[in-house]
Image: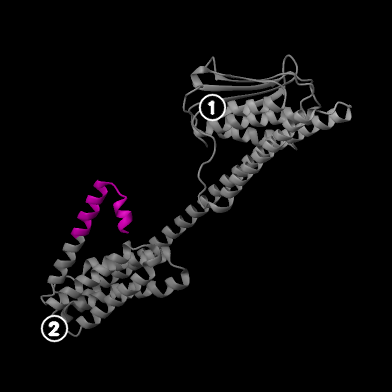
Amino acid sequence: MIRTFRNRSVIQQALLSLAAAAVLALLVAEGANTGFVPTAVATVLTGALCVAALVVRPVRFPLAAAVAVTASVVLTVVTTQLTHRPENTPGMVELCALLLLTARAVRLMPLLRAVVLVPAAACAAGLLLLRLPGAEWPTAGTVLAPVVLLGAALAVVLGLYLRVLDTLRERELLADRQDQRLEYARELHDFVAHHITAIVAQTKAVRFATASGHAPAPAELDTMLGRIEEAGSEAMESMRGIVSVLRTSAEPADTRPGGTLDRIRPLVADFARTGPPAELTLDPRLADRTLPPAVTTAVHGLVRESLTNIRKHGVDVGRVTVDVRLSPDDAGRLEVTVADDGRAARPGHRTRGDGGYGLLGLAERIEGAGGHVTAGPGAGGGWRVVADLPLGAERR
């Protein structure tokens, strides 16, 4: 509770301090109304216990509420045996605190435990009327008792309402976390697929050269194996990083690429080292520009998935171009194009990617950033993937 108070702004701390001082002043005034020091002190203590039960942490609430209710009932029973009783109020602060305590018990506690505490708190609130002089009991029973009963009923309704809201909020939070985990799973698929296709392509190159009678020299073979090892290590690192987030993080941190588009450069360079030549054209106005994470994630995923599909399904690809620039018609939109000059493959291969999930997940990522993507044969042959994104879009 103290840590939460310190984390608030200065203005909030000041307002909370004033509210606490006002409540304490009312408790002292109501205690003084008894005209007897011991009962005055006891009234202040029981009222303070009831108020404190409203602000303690949820894990400590059952014990604090039980102590507060017990202390209130004990003081009421003791007061009925004394001649010094409050003349004007039985303790309205304590009464309101007990009703709010009833609502909080309904909201936070399991139903079986709330069945015990809620009636006890409501009864303690009703018994407060017995602290008045005996001559006032008929009037209090006629006028104040129905008000207290109605207040207890409203407190139960309020607690149930807040309980339903908490349940809905928790379900929404779980759904958001599940969506985030599914997104990480898609990222895991994209990362691993990218590296595995590089391994497969280089292995095929070694086998093809060996089968054709032109086995690579030891130095060249060592270089190829080194690249395969590097791609495998990167795949393992990507997989470990994302799987660790899926396993251990209750609220996974956002590890998606964000900030600028610089991460595209090593992606294209890595593709060019193990595949056909690739050229990146990045608009100078975007070189150091900070973009929303949803946009950088979508662009990075588009380029990675497109290059992976080219490596897996491209036929006679001699050159690959990656073009990222601001739209000539609207400076607030981004155009990303990945194209190759290969021969058109069978539609089932080039449009579906690896089993149909690659471009499907890519389209979901682009649409999640507020854009759209198209893929198909280029005007001069080969394959062409084009995406259009708003720069200022936040993730839906």
Residue named by callout 2 = 83
Q: Secondary structure at mark 1?
A: loop
Question: How far is the residue under mark 2 from the one under mark 1?
Answer: 82 Å
For residue 45: magenta?
no
What kind of secondary structure does the magenta stretch mostly adopt?
Answer: helix
Left or right for 382, reference 31 = right
Q: Which residues are magenta?
A: 1-22
Q: Nearer the viewer, residue 254 or 95?
A: 254
According to the image, label 1 marks what residue?
262
Disc 2 and disc 1 in contact, CB within 8 angstroms:
no
116 sits to left or right of 135: right
Residue with the most extreme bottom position? 81
Element class at badge 2 = loop
Against 143, is 340 above or below?
Answer: above
Amino acid type at mark 1? Asp
Nearer to the camera, 156 or 333: 333
